[in-house]
Image (spheres, rainbow, N blue to C red):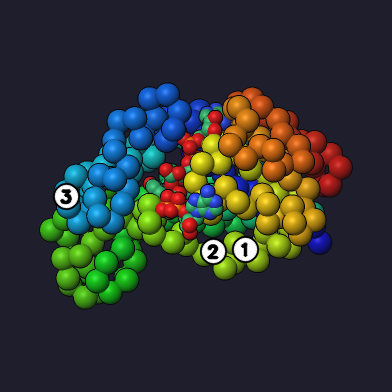
């Protein structure tokens, strides 16, 4: 049975109104990474960081999946083989479009985590620094998001999928952050056909066998229809 692994980044959610990180006016233009996306920043000013993710959670809840998210959900439903989405996004739009096989390597805005005991629970819209962990009752809650300097989630399973997939497709990511930016090399080394679908060539486009430029809501549905026409 054929397997497709699809890596997605902020670009697939751009047309849903959620800012990317490094594009003009992106999140990192408005906020210093070291202040809102590192463990040190959280230790320095937990209220600032909680408010940053409360704002992103509210934005994500208001956003709607776009044609690219729906096309990937259709691929999972109609493709005869296995389709796995490995997303760097934390917005939950893949699931809201109907995708079920989604791995959140950078965590998920709808998740809360206890930095004390590791307990996880559904995050309220507005997390407060005085919130107590429902399990250990410690005041040690944080958004269940992977920050710079932390290890992304599920890496062993992700590497296994990369070494056994027939297609590796990257959508809407700039290829600036590791380990995600190196996934294409690992998939190609194990014989996968590698395809990049992005607004413009990413920093690692030369590692892909094929690349198409355009808006995700245009080029992802086109690619899915092509895949299903030959692999239904
Ligand atoms: P990183 O840049 O430190 O790199 C992670 C790993 O990749 C490290 O082991 C590093 O040694 C390796 N690496 C770094 N540059 C490399 C290169 N040029 N070639 C090969 N390997 C390289 O990762 P990070 O910036 O610390 O971020 C950790 C994770 O957290 C990343 O996946 C990042 O995307 C994620 N993150 C998420 C958010 C969010 O809001 N969701 C914000 C920031 C970071
Ligand atoms: N359609 C397709 N691609 C798009 C669109 C669009 N409508 N709009 C933007 N893009 C592309 C940009 O060209 C860019 O290459 O999406 C990419 C977004 O890149 P980044 O802003 O760097 O976001 P991403 O690659 O997801 O960042 C990776 O870094 O800061 C960390 O954890 C954070 O998950 C993030 C990771």
Distance CA(mark 3)–CA(mark 2): 29 Å
Label 2 residue near ligand 1, CB within 8 Å? no
At x 66% / y 37%, what residue is drawn?
A: 205
Numbered disc 2: secondary structure: helix
Please state, as top left, top right, bottom left or bottom right, where the N terminus lies in the image.
bottom right
Q: x%, y% of residue 171?
A: 61, 39
Q: x%, y% of residue 94?
A: 53, 45
Q: Are marks 1 and 2 in contact (CB under 8 Å)?
A: yes
157 left or right of 153 in image: right
49 left or right of 10 in image: left
Q: Which mark is residue 159?
A: 1
Label 2 CA crowd tier, 10 Å (few <14, some 14–19, many 20+): some
Q: Which residue bears the numbered disc 2? A: 155
Q: Nearer the viewer, residue 5 or 62?
A: 5
At x 23% / y 62%, what residue is drawn?
A: 141
At x 38% / y 52%, what residue is drawn?
A: 148
Q: Is residue 117 above or below residue 113?
A: below
Label 3 CA crowd tier, 10 Å (few <14, some 14–19, many 20+): few
Numbered disc 1: secondary structure: helix
At x 59% / y 34%, what residue is drawn?
A: 202
Q: Which of the 4 quarters of the picture holds residue 213?
A: top right
Q: Is residue 96 above or below residue 63?
A: below
Q: x%, y% of residue 107?
A: 42, 55
Q: Which mark is residue 45?
A: 3
Res. 96 visible in picture = no
Q: Which mark is residue 7?
A: none
Residue at the extreme left = 130
């Amino acid at each position: 049975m054929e397997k497709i692994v699809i890596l997605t980044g902020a670009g697939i959610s751009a047309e849903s109104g959620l800012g990317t990180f490094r594009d003009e006016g992106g999140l990192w233009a408005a906020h210093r990474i070291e202040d809102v996306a590192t463990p040190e920043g959280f230790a320095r000013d937990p209220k600032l960081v909680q408010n940053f993710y409360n704002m992103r959670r509210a934005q994500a809840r208001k956003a709607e999946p776009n044609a690219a998210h729906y096309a990937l959900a259709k691929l999972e439903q109609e493709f005869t083989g296995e389709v796995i989405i490995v997303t760097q996004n934390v917005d939950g739009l893949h699931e809201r479009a109907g995708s079920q096989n989604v791995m959140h390597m950078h965590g998920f805005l709808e998740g809360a985590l206890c930095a004390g005991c590791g307990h996880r629970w559904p995050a309220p819209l507005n997390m407060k620094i005085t919130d107590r962990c429902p399990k250990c009752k410690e005041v040690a809650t944080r958004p269940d998001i992977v920050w710079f300097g932390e290890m992304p989630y599920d890496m062993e399973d992700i590497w296994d999928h990369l070494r056994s997939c027939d297609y590796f497709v990257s959508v809407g990511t700039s290829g600036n952050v590791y380990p995600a930016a190196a996934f294409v090399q690992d998939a190609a080394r194990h014989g996968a056909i590698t395809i990049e679908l992005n607004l413009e060539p990413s920093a690692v486009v030369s590692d892909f066998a094929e690349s198409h430029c355009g808006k995700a809501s245009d080029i992802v549905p086109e690619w899915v229809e092509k895949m299903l026409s030959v692999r239904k």
